[in-house]
Image: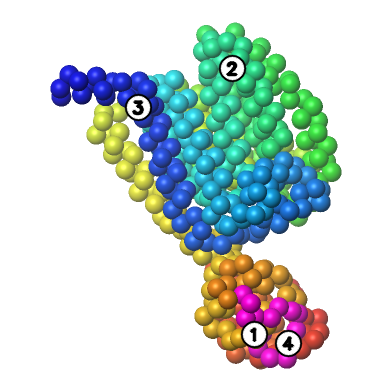
Amino acid sequence: MPHDAKDLRALLQQRLPTYALGPALLSLAIGLWGIDKVGLWDDERHTLFAIPQILWRLWEAPLIPYYASMWIWTGGGAVSSDAWLRFSSVLAMTGAVFLTSVTAKRLGGRRVGLLAGLILTLMPSVTRYAQEARVYAFATLLAALATWLVVRGAQGGGRRWWVAYALTLVTIGVLAPFGYAIVPAHGFLILQKSEWRPHLRAWAVAGLTNIPILIIAALLSARFGPNLRDWLAKPTLTNLITDIPDIAGTLAVGVVLVALSIATRTGTQWLVATAIGMAALWLVSIGPASFWLTRSFLPLAPVLAVAASFVAVKLSLPRFLTLTALLGLLVWPSLQADRQPGSRGLDPRQLAGLVDSRAEAGDVVNTAISDWLAWGVSRYSSQPDVYQYGPSSTGRAWVLDKDVPCVRLEEYTVPGGDSLLVLCQQLPEGWENRVVRN
């Protein structure tokens, strides 16, 4: 290679963190792939509905700051397409990948940073929730930022890093309190290195600044947490042991990342830190409010990615490339599955497509049993104005209900739920009162 070319390459490596930009751009590309192929699922619909009525959703009080940020992102609801709503999360997760690469590079070099970013990018849980209009990608970004700040501060960067760390924790507390699981993980990591231990006090002070936020979060949990118990069960001790791989999104990927982590001493320490974060989340979840579900584990994903990345120092370039390819092959099925109808529950876009392909002008789209069908048709249909919307009909009507008592002209099984899309000959008034529920 000519001398000038070598100088240019060295300059680019110095000026541009290519080891981090590569994974970040890959994360961005994966996030954009099929971003609007599947319609908004139920949780995302809550985000869409909350944008124009933020202050009235007190039953979702902990999420009001996130809804406020989405109000700004959508211009008060003026730009609310599926792709635009989800693009905010794609950008947040891209930032999390970049910060995770930078953090790992400071700890183990460029190749470690590159592998950490690639691992986080390819985690099925990350690729899934990077494409969802909810708070989880932002929680992951903030956790990755907090982890980077801890490393900078513990390496002797000065007080400014700990001030920034404290402010990041406050933001986590306001936007996504379940992200506090990252704090005890950081404390454990500081204790593992003798040169980091003098900064334990700074870490503790930064954590203590969040006491007012913790008190508010506890009060909100006591007030609104019991409402979640109907669908989010209290975890058992078995869950604490068996669900760690869920951070990665699938059991197979989780087992691989754990195996890579324990291949090095430093990786094992970061893996233990991940487990400590899970334990903290478990302790909180056996209280009045449970956060025990896969998407709440996402703030710990950057720590697990760093844990698995230290193995890169033991790998030759061919083995490094082989490992990366194997990870890609391992996650490919989930990448495809997440973009198929039914992967996130009933898909309103698919429902609207079925109705459009078989409907006639004047058909009634039922609103009595559930508004899911009517909402989906009105949002995703290519011709929403040709239909009528109401609880009953004197002619043909579309109903999303397997128990509807009518003369059925057609019926369709829809992935993602146990309901049927039924085309009825007629829906007389009061028909819904005769539906038998289990």
**Image position, residue 131 (x, y; %):** 53, 50
Q: Is residue 76 left or right of residue 3?
A: right
C-beta proximity under 8 Å, tags 2 and 4: no
SS class of the residue under badge 2?
A: helix
Q: Is residue 199 visible?
A: yes
Q: For residue 393, which numbered disc appears in the image?
A: 4
SS class of the residue under badge 1?
A: loop
* Image quadrant occupied by the C terminus: bottom right
Q: CA distance from mark 2 to mark 4?
A: 65 Å
What crowding class fits label 2: few (fewer than 14 Cα within 10 Å), some (14-19), or many (20 or more)?
A: many
Residue denoted by label 2: 161
On the image, which quarter does residue 433 sit in? bottom right
Q: Earlier in the sequence, mark 3 or mark 4?
A: 3
Residue denoted by label 3: 111
Q: CA distance from mark 3 to mark 4?
A: 65 Å
Q: CA distance from mark 4 to mark 1?
A: 9 Å
